[in-house]
Image: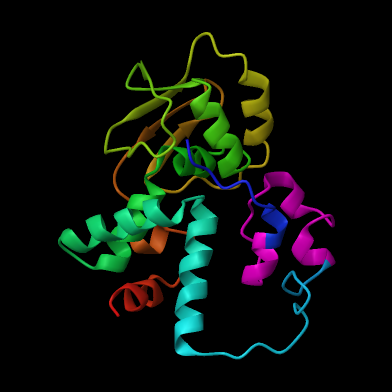
């Protein structure tokens, strides 16, 4: 299964902001962006030429890294979003938000998307009573998420819930029983991703 194995702190430094790819570490002084606030590489501190294409490309790369999606996967999401009614950029973000691994992070059941992906791949979660081990699984309205009865990761998940702020209004979580429900699809104003989706649409429209 294809996955990104690159250094996560370097990805945040490349985009010039925290993408919270490493969970709790991103909240401490050990965060790569806090320690070195310039892009990685030999020419990281040099002046970079700005262009319209560069701005659009960086926005697309930021979205890919934030959600942990590879290039081919991201292009497929965009193609599906462009075929749906409504605004393409918002459709794209909505599909990315409804990925199983992202929803676990939003619920507070995982400290990062990489941890959520691992928990899903190892079969620690069920959807509507059936074990699902696909991180990209698209959750739908009224889907019920629960920890598998024989899961050995209960304590890891409970530790992650302690880092949780507020659960989005389109989700419902019970941190005591480690269950949750998808109430509806998220609205654009409820999506906290640091992404300007219109720039991505402009890039792919060329």
- For the residue pair 83 and 107, the one nearer the viewer reads as 83
Task: Give the percent coordinates (x, y) of residue 5.
Answer: 62, 46
Quarter of the picture containing the C terminus is: bottom left
Task: Give the percent coordinates (x, y) of residue 132.
Answer: 39, 24
Left/right of residue 80 with respect to residue 20 in the rendered view:
left
Q: How many marks?
A: 0
Task: Give the percent coordinates (x, y) of residue 160.
Answer: 65, 35
Is residue 109 something that shows in the picture?
no
Left/right of residue 97 with respect to residue 15 in the rendered view:
left
Q: Residue sitting at 48 percent across and 15 percent down?
A: 148
Q: Is residue 123 above or below residue 159?
A: above
Q: Residue sitting at 69 percent across and 53 percent down?
A: 7
Is residue 46 something that shows in the picture?
yes
In reply to whether residue 116 is colored magenta, the answer given is no
Task: Give the percent coordinates (x, y) of residue 87.
Answer: 23, 68
Q: Is residue 116 above or below residue 90?
A: above
- For the residue pair 88 and 178, the one nearer the viewer reads as 88
Q: Where, by quadrant of the figure, is residue 84 drawn? A: bottom left
Q: Where, by quadrant of the figure, is residue 16 drawn? A: bottom right
Q: Residue sitting at 65 percent across and 61 percent down?
A: 11
Span colored in magenta = 11-35
């Amino acid at each position: 299964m294809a996955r990104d194995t690159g250094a996560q702190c370097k990805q945040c430094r490349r985009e010039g902001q925290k993408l919270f790819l490493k969970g709790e570490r991103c909240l401490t002084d050990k965060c790569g962006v806090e320690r070195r606030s310039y892009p990685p590489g030999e020419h990281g501190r040099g002046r970079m030429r700005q262009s319209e294409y560069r701005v659009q490309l960086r926005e697309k790369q930021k979205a890919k890294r934030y959600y942990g999606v590879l290039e081919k996967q991201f292009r497929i999401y965009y193609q599906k979003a462009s075929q749906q009614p409504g605004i393409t950029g918002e459709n794209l973000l909505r599909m990315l938000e409804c990925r199983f691994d992202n929803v676990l992070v939003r619920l507070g059941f995982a400290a990062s998307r990489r941890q959520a992906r691992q928990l899903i791949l190892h079969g620690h979660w069920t959807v509507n009573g059936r074990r699902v081990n696909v991180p990209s699984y698209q959750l739908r309205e009224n889907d019920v998420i629960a920890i598998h009865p024989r899961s050995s990761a209960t304590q890891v998940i409970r530790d992650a819930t302690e880092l949780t702020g507020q659960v989005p209004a389109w989700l419902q979580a019970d941190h005591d029983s480690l269950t949750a429900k998808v109430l509806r699809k998220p609205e654009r104003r409820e999506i906290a991703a640091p992404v300007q989706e219109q720039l991505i649409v402009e890039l792919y429209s060329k």
